[in-house]
Image (cartoon, rainbow, N blue to C red):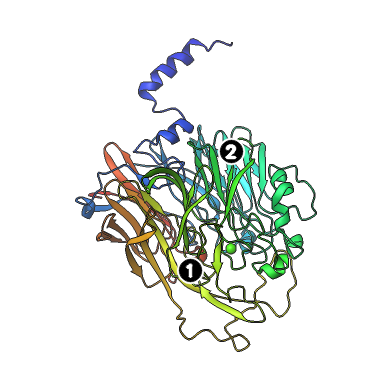
Amino acid sequence: MKRLPLWTGLSLALCLGACGKPGVDAKRIEAAAAGEWLSYGRTYDEQRFSPLDKVNRETVARLGVAWWAEFDTDRGQEATPLVADGVLYTTTAWSKVYAFDARTGKPLWSYDPKVPGEKGADACCDVVNRGAAIWKGRIYVGTLDGRLIALDAKSGEVAWDVQTTDRTRAYTITGAPRVIKGKVLIGNGGAEYGVRGYVSAYDADSGKLAWRFYTTPNPKGLPDGAASDKVFREKAAASWSDGVWKESGGGGTVWDAITFDPRTGLVYIGVGNGNPWNHKLRSGGKGDNLFLASIVALNPDTGDYVWHYQTTPGESWDYTATQHIMVADLKIRGTARRVVMQAPKNGFFYVLDAKTGALISAEKFVPVDWAERIDLKTGRPVEVASARYENGQHSNQMVGPLGGHNWHPMAFSPKTGLVYIPAQHGRGNYADPADFKYVPGTWNTGMRPNPAGPSARPRPPAAPEPRNGELIAWDPVTQTKRWSVDFPHMVTSGILATDGGLVFHSAMNRFSGYDAASGKRLWSYDIGASAIAPASTYEIAGEQYLALMVGRGGAGGYDAPRQPGRLLVFKLGG
Ligand code: CA
C-alpha cells in the first residue's frame, strides 16, 4: 500500500474541522443533512420533504426575497436548485448550469454546453432542463442534444462530455441525472417523434457506459448487448405485434423519474408513452407493449430487470408513467409497508410494494372516465367501451394527453402522511387518422387532427371542457382527498413540503405557503411571472432559505408577456 505523504494526512485532519464536509457521496445523500439539498428530490426516496422548520406556520408571513438572479433566456424553467457546502447549483433552459454562493447570491461560475438552437425543434415541450446531480466534487447535467456532462463543482470546468443518444434522431434530454452507487443514470425524451426509449448508467469518474436498459424490444429482433436483452427474450418482446413500432422504435422514453431506494437496493424508472400513441397503428392493436407506461425496477449495479408494473397496458393515449416516483413507509391495515407511489398521467394514484411491485391500491385522484377502476386482482384498468376509439369513432375522454398529473414533482410529508399532488383536469380527443405514414423525426402520434370537428362523432353533451388545476393533499393509505385548492388554469408548479408544517406551491404569478394539514393559505408572494418548477430549501448559518426557479414554458406553453428566467431566494425578514 502506498503511504500518503504527511502533509496529506495533516490537511485531511485539518479539513475535518475547517474545510467543510467531504464530497457528496451515497452516505451524505442517504444521511440527508437537514440544511442541504443534495439530489433532485432532496433524498434518494424523492419525497421532497425538508426537516427544516424555522420557516413555519407562525413565521412564514415574514418570508421575503433574500437575493435573486436573472438568466439570459425567457424559456421555461423547471430545475430544482441543489445546495451543498454553501453553494447553490441550478440549471436553466438550454441546459446551462450556474453556481452561486447560496447565502449571498454571488455568482461563482456558469457553464453553457452550447446546445445548437435547431435542436429546439426536437423538443415536444420546450427547451427545459430539470436539474443537475452532485457527486464527489462534480456536477452532472444532461443536455437537450443528448449529452451527459461532468463539471468540476468548484470551477465549472468540463471533466468529461459523452453523447448518450443517436444525434440523427429526435432524442432530447430534459431530466435530471441521478448518481447511484458511483454511476450516473440518465434517460431521454422524444417519444412523440419516434425514438426507442432507454436509460443508461455511466461511471461517474470516467464517463464510461456501464449498462443500458431499453424499454421497448429491438425492432429487428436482435440482441442489443444491453441489460434488457434477457427480459425481452424471455417475456417482454412477446407483448408486441407487427406495426409502426418497428420503424419508430416504439417510444417508451424515460424522461423524468429515476428513483433509488437504498433499503430495497432497487432503482425505479418511469417509462413513457408509445410511438405512435395509437395502439392499432403501433402494434396492430395487439399486446400490452412492455414496458410502455410502466414503472420498472432494476438492479442499479447491472441494469438487470427485477420487476415491473404497467399502469396502462396497450397504451393508446399518451398516458406516460414517467411521472415522479417516490418511496415511503406507510402503515396500511396495521402493517408497515415500504411502498412506491406514483400519480401518472392516466389519473390513478398507485401504491405498490417497493420490493415486489405488487399492487396495493389504485384510485382516481382526478375525475377519470376512460376506465372505471383498476382491478386489484389483475392490476389492470377496467376500460370503458369507447376508450379505444374504434370503428371510426373518436373518444373525448378524461384525462387527455397532458394527463391528470405531469412532470411537476409531488411532495410527501411523513408528518401529515399526505402526498401533495399538482393535479391537472383536462379532456383529450382521440381518433384514428384517415391515413398515416411514419415520417422520421416529425410528430408521429397516429391521431386524426382536430377529431372534435365535423367528421368526428360529436362530443357527449354532458362532457364539459375543464382546463383547471388543483393542488391536492392525498391520503395514500385511504386513497382519498384530504383537502384541495382549485386554480382556473391547468398547469401549476411542483411542490415542496417542510417540517414547518408547510407546503409550498406556485400558480401563475403567486408563490404560496399552505398549512400542510388544513390547506389554508398562510403566505403568498407575487413573483412577477409564473413558476412551474418546485422550490427547494436549505439552511446556512442558522437561517432557512427557499429557492425557486421562475419562468413559464414547458408543456403548458408560454404566457405573454414573456419574462426573463429568474432564481428567487427567500428567507425570513428578506
Ligand atoms: Ca408524451
Q: Can you name the residue that lies furthest to the bottom here? A: 454
Nearest to N terminus: mark 1 or mark 2: 2
Viewer-side residue, 294 vs 12: 294
Please indicate whether residue 409 sits to the left or right of residue 252 in the image.
left
Location of residue 480 by image quarter = bottom left
In the image, residue 528 lies at what x, y percent?
A: 35, 64
Tell me if 450 is positioned left or right of 22 in this view.
Answer: right
User: Is residue 337 or residue 111 the one in the foreground?
Assistant: 337
Q: What residue sits 40% from the left and 48% below the top?
A: 48
Foreground pick, 495 / 310:
310
Pick the front one: 174 or 145: 174
Helix, strand, or loop for circle 2?
loop
Residue 41 lies left or right of residue 127; in this view the side is left
Q: As shown in the figure, which amino acid type bears the numbered disc 1?
A: Tyr
User: Which numbered marker is on residue 425?
Assistant: none
Q: Which residue in the structure is indicated by mark 2?
A: 300
Mark number for residue 558?
1
Q: Amino acid at mark 2?
A: Pro
The quadrant in which the N terminus is found is top right
Q: Residue at x 58, y 40 (%)?
A: 184
Q: CA distance from mark 1 to mark 2?
A: 37 Å
Around disc 1, counting alpha carbons within 10 Å, would you say few (fewer than 14), some (14 to 19), or many (20 or more)? some
